[in-house]
């Protein structure tokens, strides 16, 4: 089975997993690797390798393109390791993985992540306009 690895600056990934589990229940196939302020690239790399060492198949969601967590893990791909990595992780992306048994195509991930961004004020304004018409 595929696993999901959440990586981030600070404890964002840990809290994203905790928040997702409030909605979706416990998730044994989701793992986190945090880059703490007191750590360097090597520390983060060692933690990532420890988390993934026994996993045959996994996908990585990172907080930020160009940040240290993404850059460190991307170097592993450049060295020949095989896994997918996406940036801009958010709760809808994680829930999408869970809902699809941890198998989501790259195109679907991008589309669903974009579709999860809404300007609520506009939705509410349009909703009020519809109410006035009735």
Image (cartoon, helix red, strand yellow):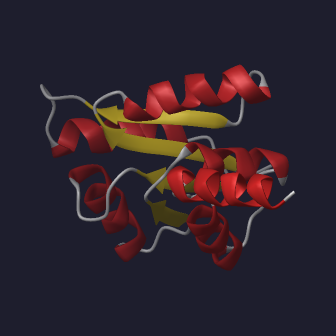
Q: Who's the residue at 51% across and 32% down the image?
A: 16
User: Residue 57 appears at what percent x and percent y?
Assistant: 68, 56
Q: Who's the residue at 22% across and 52% down the image?
A: 68
Q: Is residue 83 visible?
A: no
User: Residue 129 appears at what percent x and percent y?
Assistant: 69, 59
Outermost residue on the bottom side: it is 107
The answer to whether 44 is drawn above or below residue 93 in the figure is above
| On-image quarter of the C terminus | bottom right
User: Residue 56 appears at what percent x and percent y?
Assistant: 68, 52
Q: Who's the residue at 36% across and 75% down the image?
A: 78
The quadrant holding residue 54 is top right
User: Residue 59 appears at what percent x and percent y?
Assistant: 59, 57
Q: Who's the residue at 48% across and 52% down the image?
A: 89
Q: Is residue 81 visible?
A: yes
Q: Observer-nearest residue: 46 or 63? A: 63
The mark total stands at 0
Q: Observer-nearest residue: 54 or 96? A: 96
The answer to whether 27 is drawn above or below residue 82 in the figure is above
């Amino acid at each position: 089975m595929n696993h999901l690895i959440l990586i981030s600056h600070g404890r964002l990934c840990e809290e994203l997993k905790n928040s997702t589990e409030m909605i979706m229940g416990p998730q044994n196939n989701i793992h986190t690797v945090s880059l703490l302020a007191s750590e360097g690239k090597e520390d983060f790399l060692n933690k990532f390798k420890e988390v993934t060492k026994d996993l045959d198949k996994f996908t990585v969601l990172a907080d930020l393109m160009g940040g240290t967590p993404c850059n460190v893990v991307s170097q592993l791909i450049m060295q020949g390791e095989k896994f997918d990595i996406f940036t801009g992780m958010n709760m809808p992306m994680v829930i999408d993985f869970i809902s699809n048994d941890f198998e989501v195509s790259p195109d679907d991930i991008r589309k669903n992540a974009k579709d999860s961004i809404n300007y609520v004020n506009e939705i509410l304004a349009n909703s009020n306009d519809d109410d006035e018409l009735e």
